[in-house]
């Protein structure tokens, strides 16, 4: 690994990525950076962050249906657990 530049860590755990490194990686303000760790040290990689739903469209439909229902009052813990398991 070739050392190109150095930076100091602040008390809040922040560093400024040196200009030469930013130019090499083609990153600017607001860019997302991925960090990796290897035997030689820390690896910085420019990356893109995209939003991705954790649910399928059918799961969202079920969630929306459940959210639109009126609440149910159960008279015992056993009945409440049974109701939750049935959802």
Image (cartoon, rainbow, N blue to C red):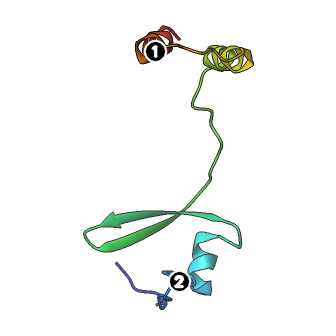
Q: Position of residue 36 (x, y in %)?
A: 39, 63
**For residue 54, what is the image quadrant?**
top right
Q: Position of residue 59 (x, y in %)?
A: 61, 17
Q: Residue at x 53, y 83 (%)?
A: 15
- Distance Cα–Cα, label 2 vs label 1: 55 Å
55 with respect to 70 (left or right)? left
49 with respect to 1 (left or right)? right
Q: Is residue 47 above or below residue 60?
A: below
Q: Residue furthest front?
A: 75
Q: Residue furthest right?
A: 68
The circle on residue 16 is none
Query: Which residue is labeled 1 in the image?
Result: 76
Q: Position of residue 35 (x, y in %)?
A: 45, 64
Front residue of 65/70: it is 70
Secondary structure at numbered mark 1: loop
Secondary structure at numbered mark 2: loop
Asked if labels 1 and 2 touch by Cβ distance under 8 angstroms, the answer is no
**Disc 1: CA contacts within 10 A as few (<14), some (14-19) or many (>=20):** few
Callout count:
2
Q: Residue at x 61, y 77 (%)?
A: 22
**Disc 2: CA contacts within 10 A as few (<14), some (14-19) or many (>=20):** few
Q: Residue at x 74, y 17 (%)?
A: 68
Q: Position of residue 10 (x, y in %)?
A: 50, 89
The circle on residue 15 is 2
Q: Is residue 8 above or below residue 42?
A: below
Closer to the N terminus: mark 2 or mark 1? 2
Q: Is residue 4 above or below residue 62?
A: below
59 with respect to 36 (left or right)? right
**For residue 27, what is the image quadrant?**
bottom right
Front residue of 49/67: it is 67
């Amino acid at each position: 690994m070739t050392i190109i530049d150095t930076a100091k860590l602040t008390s809040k755990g922040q560093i400024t990525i040196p200009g030469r490194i930013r130019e090499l990686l083609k990153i600017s303000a607001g860019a997302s950076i991925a960090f990796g760790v290897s035997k030689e040290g820390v690896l910085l990689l420019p990356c893109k962050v995209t939003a991705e739903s954790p649910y399928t469209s059918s799961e969202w439909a079920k969630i929306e249906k459940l959210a639109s229902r009126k609440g149910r009052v159960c008279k015992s813990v056993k009945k409440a657990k049974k109701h939750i398991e049935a959802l």
